[in-house]
Amino acid sequence: MPVSERPLLTHVRASARAVLEHNARHGQTPDGIRFAYTRPDNIKYPDQFYWDSCLIALAWSQLDPARARAELRTLAAAMDPSGHLGHTIFWSGRVRLARLPGYNVHRRNDRSTATIQPPLLGAAWADVAERSPDAAGFRADGLRIVRRHLDWLDRTRAEDDGLIGILQPDETGLDATPTYDRVLGWRAHPYPGFVALVHANRRRGFSYRRARAEGAFTAIDPLVNTAWALSWYGLARLGDPEAGERAEQIVAALEARLWDEGRGMCFAEGPDGTRLPVATWAGLAPLALPGLSPNVAARLIDEQLLNPARFWLAWPVPSTSAQEPSFRPGDTGWPIRRYWRGPTWPFTWWFVHRGLRLHGREETARRLALRVAELIAREGMREYYNPITGRGLGAGHFAVSAIALELLAAPEA
Ligand code: GLC
């Protein structure tokens, strides 16, 4: 690391530690379950969010692996015996009444939502286990817990080719992504009609199989399936003898079904099997997959990510390509502020940075890490950033931004 960059990195490390400590919560439920998790933001997101916690655990693992293990063990404690692990877990009370109509719960008292998020648990557990060499029980428990979770997804969500489907766009983690605008129309996420979609799914018991059978909205999303494959790779690293092969099959299916050779990008597939060619960072997420074909990886990097007209803006990586008509570098404004149509989002950094390193682009990975560090030093731990001006947006103390620690911990950063 050049000497001139040291103060910058020291500053980011201190900010990351501060936001993680600031948002950390622990306690016990009335029925005696202990929890210790990190809120994405104390005001905007007081609950535990599945994939936030996975990335937060990775950030913690750079500082204090015991806190990382506690974060993931708390997620595991929220898992049903069936293996279902919800998008959001309500450790400190019920869903607020005002939010109930649009919330993905069966009943107000549910401890977690019935819907999913990109299933990263296996990937995070394996990384944290590797950084916890003395915690043998953690690895062994992970093998059992992650397997149970992935088996649940397999039973309830997998298609014949092994890819998993979603019921609602918010299951991708990117609530208002423009990808599904065309198929959802008035029920797309930024519009009030979204509540109708939630109601219909509640009537179906949030069952993917039923939604599929009834011809309702469902989709196969590249980001969700990247997380799915990464968790099988993680399970293999934890010691499951069948998981590695399973991961490779998922990657092959993802390439066969979601890679668009003509456009050089991965796209989601809608309910009737049609491709939804909206270029968002979800299409870059497969870069994080070890088994991705070198040709696909190279094209995603050179034609999409590093293209200054699409994703390589001043403060990478925007959530939607700047060439999309739906691109908005800031929030969408009235009536509901939404951000996934352009703003840079910390979740993206981890997938893209990991992918760059995996596919031998160390120098670009390092450039991204430094850009992230500069942005945080300028604007703080924000939820989003305008990819053109760098201005911080959304939540003010956003714990997932601490994922910058993972980028900076990589060699050479
Ligand atoms: C938003 C995002 C979701 C994230 C949550 C907390 O709801 O859609 O992916 O987990 O914020 O950060």
Image: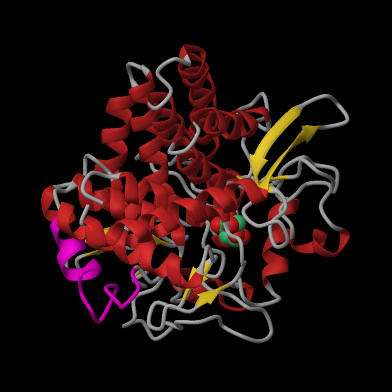
Vertically, is 23 above or below 300? above
309 drawn magenta: yes
Horizontal relation, residue 86 to residue 306: left or right: right
| 30 is higher (above) or lower (below) than 318 | above
> Percent from the top left, x then y, of residue 189?
61, 71
| Residue 41 covered by magenta stretch | no
Residue 160 visible? The answer is no
The residue located at (29%, 73%) in the rendering is 311
Frontmost residue, 176 versus 346 = 346
Q: Residue at x 44, y 65 (%)?
A: 376
Vertical side of 170 occupied by 68: above or below: above
Q: Quadrant of ligand 1?
A: bottom right
Where's residue 180, x and y in %?
49, 69
* Relative horizontal placement of residue 112, taking residue 229 as reference (left or right): right
Query: Left of 229 or right of it: where is 156?
Result: right
Can residue 294 be seen in the rendering of this structure? yes
Bounds of the magenta segment:
298-316
- State the residue in front, 256 or 359: 359
